[in-house]
Image (cartoon, rainbow, N blue to C red):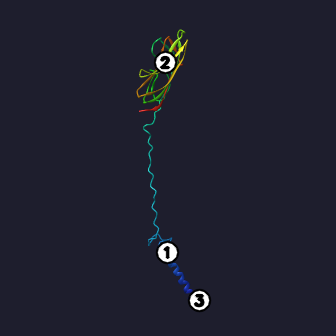
Amino acid sequence: MPMKKQAAKIKAAAKGSVKAKKVVSASGYGLGSSKKKSGYGCKPAKSVCKPAKSVAIKSSKKAKRKSAFRALSNQTQPITANTFTQVEFGQEQFDLGREYNPATSTFRAKLSGVYTFVTSVLFNTTPTAGTSVILFIMVNDRIAAVKTGNFTSGGFVDITTIVKLRSGDDVEVRILSEQPGEIIEGTARFEGVLNRVTK
């Protein structure tokens, strides 16, 4: 084959190859064209991610309030024989719910619920004599718990009890002795804690 004819065929083949590449690009399979003329072109993918909705954390309206207190006797208290007497606890150590009044030695519940109360008293007779001492935990002037101690000259009496209170109920401690005597300063305590809130 003459050299001129062979060179012409090679040039023609090269031109055909270039056209083929352009056709492929136009059909959507090419990499350089952004405009797709056929239905086979790839469209930009739509974003499926939506902005996350902010979730506000709300505090529970039924959150439990803390309720607990502890008080001690801060002075020696004389007790008259056969007299129903309120025990004085004038030294408040803590009161989380601001429900205990040291001036009146009374706890007033702000929340309805089940409470535990503890009280103890060291009683000495004056003059020394055998006696029976009765200790009471009172709720609204009614007996909620009671314990009796019999001594030759004096001793401790203590009570631990669980009571169900309504909001506004008053709790206090009282004592009754056959013989006159006294509660020694710093030896009596009165404390309570809310176990569970009720309706």
- The percent position of residue 153, horizontal first and vertical second, equals 55, 12
- Report which quarter residue 155 is drawn in: top right
Q: Quadrant of residue 112?
A: top left
Q: Is residue 39 left or right of residue 122?
A: left
Residue 140, above or below 45 = above
Q: Which residue is mark 1?
A: 24
Mark 1 or 2: in front is: 2
Q: Does residue 167 lie above or below 88 as drawn?
A: below
Give how far apart the Cα atoms at labels 3 and 1 are. Answer: 32 Å
User: Which residue is under mark 3?
Assistant: 3
State the CA–CA distance, disc 3 to disc 2. Answer: 132 Å
Q: What number is the disc on residue 44?
A: none
- Mark positioned earlier in the residue sequence (3 or 1): 3
Point 49% across, 73% down: residue: 25
Residue depicted at x 53% and y 84%: 12
Amino acid type indicated by mark 1: Val
Give residue 92's position: percent from left, percent from top.
49, 24
Quadrant occupied by the C terminus: top left
The residue that label 2 is drawn on is 135
Foreground label between 3 and 1 = 1
Depth check: 40 or 54 in front? Answer: 40
Q: Amino acid at mark 2?
A: Leu
Q: Is residue 107 above or below residue 65?
A: above
Q: Which SS class for mark 3?
A: helix
Residue 24 vertical position relative to residue 197 in the rendered view, above or below = below
Counting residues from the start of the chain, the first of labels 1 and 2 encountered is 1
Seen at 51% across and 76% down, the residue is 21
Dot 3 or dot 2, earlier in sequence: 3
Look at the numbered discs 1 and 2 and tell me whether their residues touch, using CB distance below 8 Å.
no
Q: Secondary structure at mark 2?
A: strand
Choose between 87 and 166: the one closer to the eye: 166
Task: Give me the residue at 57% from left, 86% from top.
Answer: 7
